[in-house]
Image (spheres, rainbow, N blue to C red):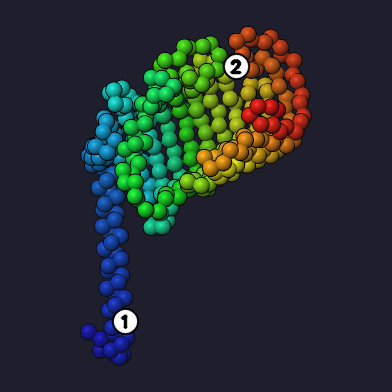
Amino acid sequence: MCRYGNKDDCAIKKTKKIIRSIIGGILLMYVCLIMLVNIPAIQKIIGGWTADVLSEKIHTGVSIGKVDLGLLNRIIIDDIDIKDQEGNTMLKADRMAVKIELLPLLNGTVRITNTQLFGLTAHLKRKTTEAKPNYQFIIDALSSDDTNDNTKPIDMRINSFVMRRGNITYDVLSEPVTEVFDINHLNITNINTTLSVKVFNADSLDLTLKRLNLKEQNSGLTLHNMQTKITANRMEAYIAPLHIKLQESEVSIDTMNVQYPTYHDDKAFMFYANNMEATVIPSNFNAFLAQPLNISTPLHLQANLDGTEDEL
């Protein structure tokens, strides 16, 4: 009851009190919810429910150890295991953490502030070079079945993606195994990368690779580091700069432009590389050679390059 002042002042004070009570109630419920979902038993229940939903969506076995719904928009998923359609483990990860901005989702933009992936193991394969890979069913399951779907295409942005301790194998089972680097048989280990994707949609890509190192076990190829920035669309890609380090060899290119054919024209594949500087030790490239080289003398190169798919 307001004994002094006019009725308008009393109404304003009551309204403010009600609003504070509502906000306080919402915050209290949110804190209680966060405390609830941080109970290990609840995290396992959420993990099991999430695995069941994914399993039904992609029609294969999925298991998840636990799901931790962190403050605001952070999600942490532990012990992920996804089978292929033959019942073999295809994807495993010790931990995946994602932080998503919520407001851009209303405009069809997936804006991921931070993504971390630890302990990834992927076993990818296909029976022949023409056959579908064992992960194709996931792509098909997540694609829209409605050919007349007029929904707005997803526009994705990832401010930071970090992978540590990644391992990926890829095999085309019909192809013979060789002792050199073979795109049909890859065993890539110790993948560590940091990158950001400012634009990723059907027409454009803007990617900055801050760090990438790995080892291909079959051939012995070791990539100590790779850094670059790629801006691309349906017709061409612009790369600037590009830096690659293999053992003692290093290659740097200030700018590179790659033009490629599309379904709508017969334009030839073309590329331009400006101000390439390289220090190359030939024996560092034995992973690509059937007859290894025993040359450890460094070669220093500096050039501008251009060419097509047929000539350099």
Q: Nearer the viewer, residue 77 or 31?
A: 77
| Disc number placed over residue 12 in the picture, else none | 1
Residue occupying the point 38% across, 19% down: 127
Q: Nearer the viewer, mark 1 or mark 2?
A: 2
Residue occupying the point 27% across, 79% down: 14
Vertically, is 18 above or below 37?
below
Label 2 secondary element: helix
Say whether residue 242 is left or right of residue 86: right
Amino acid type of the residue that numbered disc 1 sits on in the rendered structure? Ile
Percent coordinates x, y for residue 128 in the rendering: 41, 20
- Residue on which the image places disc 2: 288
* First in sequence: mark 1 vs mark 2: 1
Percent coordinates x, y for residue 207 in the rendering: 55, 42
Residue occupying the point 31% across, 43% down: 145
Say whether residue 218 is left or right of residue 92: right
Q: Quadrant of the N terminus?
A: bottom left
Label 1 secondary element: helix
Amino acid type of the residue that numbered disc 2 sits on in the rendered structure? Phe
